[in-house]
Image (spheres, grey):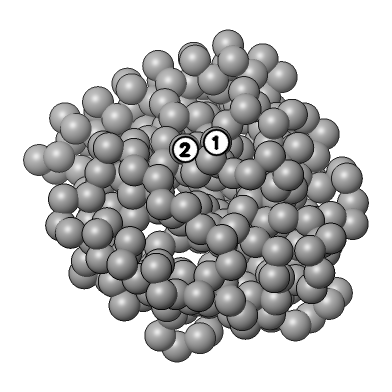
């Protein structure tokens, strides 16, 4: 790979990563074998207090990476704010941003076919490969779709290596997503994510923004990364922010069944037991975020993207 190849900026976030430091080091080292020599790393520390920022700084000094920068956020900006900070610190000539979770390790040679496909068509906004389980190497995450109730919808898994299985999907999965920088800038306000969404449904909203701006999102049958998953959040945190993000899209990009989705949201809150008041707050906050997004992106539409449509009888059962 020559210096004339487009520059890829790899953005990785760290927040108190001491407990998964071995995986983080492995993931950073995997940049050397990802199949693309012209890259830079922007590692954002989201206000760590466990010494992991200092440990990573020492590791980077001897890691043999081509180019890197360690950026201190000073506080926890969330996944969205941290990624935006990394994106803002990319080099001016960067054409692609690879968002790589701190608990993900790139498969050797995987970035080259993904980046070449992304660059081959200016109508593309993002691409994903298959995300594998870190331990077993088996396919972990299927192509990323939403249904009409803004719920993740998992079709049958696509075997990595099946060249016929390239699919248009709703959104790019955040564990290892490649984004065209010009598409990101066109679809938003100069940032990758909307920081009102602290975590979860951030990549979903990005996908709808890209599609609404006329850019497509593809899943390619290429094994791209091994992902631990769940290393950065607890179940309660995930439930709160997933419910909040889903409520935001209910307002910002409504589907055909708004009453049914509203009932689903509140049922989820009520079933949370002692956590129900917190879940109700998640919904109320999500509605407020949704109004912000609707004003910010008046053309945002669920049906601009490929979504799993529900038959009326089936939808009534959800």
Residue at horizontal 33 percent and vertical 61 percent from the top: 57
Q: Is residue 10 left or right of residue 244?
A: right
SS under mark 2:
helix
SS under mark 1:
helix
Q: Nearer the viewer, residue 203 or 74?
A: 74
Q: Quadrant of residue 273?
A: top left
Residue located beneath label 2 in the image: 85
Q: Is residue 79 above or below residue 160?
A: above
Residue located beneath label 1 in the image: 88
Whole-percent x, y for residue 285 in the image: 33, 22
Q: Is residue 62 above or below residue 85?
A: below
Residue at horizontal 40 percent and vertical 45 percent from the top: 71
Residue farthest along the front direction in this orientation: 61
Can residue 169 be spotted in the picture? no
Residue farthest along the left direction in this orientation: 274
Q: Is residue 179 left or right of residue 59?
A: right
Mark 2 and mark 1: span between their CA atoms?
5 Å
- Mark 2 and mark 1 residues within 8 Å of each other at the beta carbon: yes
Residue farthest along the right direction in this orientation: 121
Q: Nearer the viewer, residue 216 or 66?
A: 66
> Neighbour class for label 2 at 10 Å: few (<14), some, many (≥20)?
many
């Amino acid at each position: 790979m020559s210096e004339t190849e487009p520059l890829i900026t790899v953005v990785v976030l760290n927040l108190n990563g001491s407990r998964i430091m071995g995986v983080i080091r492995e993931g950073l080292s995997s940049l050397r074998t990802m199949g693309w020599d012209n890259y830079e790393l922007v590692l954002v520390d989201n206000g760590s207090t466990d010494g992991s920022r200092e440990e990573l700084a020492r590791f980077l000094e001897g890691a043999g990476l081509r180019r890197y920068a360690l950026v201190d956020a000073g506080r926890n900006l969330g996944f969205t704010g941290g990624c935006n900070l990394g994106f803002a610190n990319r080099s001016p000539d960067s054409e692609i941003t690879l968002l790589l979770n701190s608990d993900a390790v790139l498969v050797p040679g995987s970035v080259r076919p993904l980046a070449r496909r992304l660059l081959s068509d200016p109508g593309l906004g993002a691409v994903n490969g298959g995300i594998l389980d870190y331990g077993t190497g088996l396919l972990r995450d299927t192509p990323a779709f939403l249904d009409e109730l803004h719920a993740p919808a998992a079709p049958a898994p696509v075997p990595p290596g099946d060249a016929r299985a390239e699919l248009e999907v709703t959104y790019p999965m955040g564990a290892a997503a490649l984004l065209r920088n010009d598409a990101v800038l066109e679809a938003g306000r100069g940032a990758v994510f909307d920081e009102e969404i602290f975590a979860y449904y951030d990549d979903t909203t990005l996908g709808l923004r890209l599609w609404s701006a006329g850019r497509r999102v593809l899943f390619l049958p290429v094994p791209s990364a091994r992902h631990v998953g769940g290393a950065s959040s607890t179940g309660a945190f995930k439930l709160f922010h997933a419910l909040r993000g889903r409520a935001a899209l209910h307002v910002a990009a409504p589907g055909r069944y708004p009453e049914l989705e509203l009932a689903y949201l509140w049922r989820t809150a009520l079933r949370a037991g002692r956590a129900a008041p917190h879940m109700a707050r998640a919904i109320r906050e999500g509605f407020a975020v949704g109004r912000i997004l609707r004003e910010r992106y008046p053309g945002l539409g669920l049906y601009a993207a490929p979504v799993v449509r529900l038959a009326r009888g089936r939808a009534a059962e959800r």
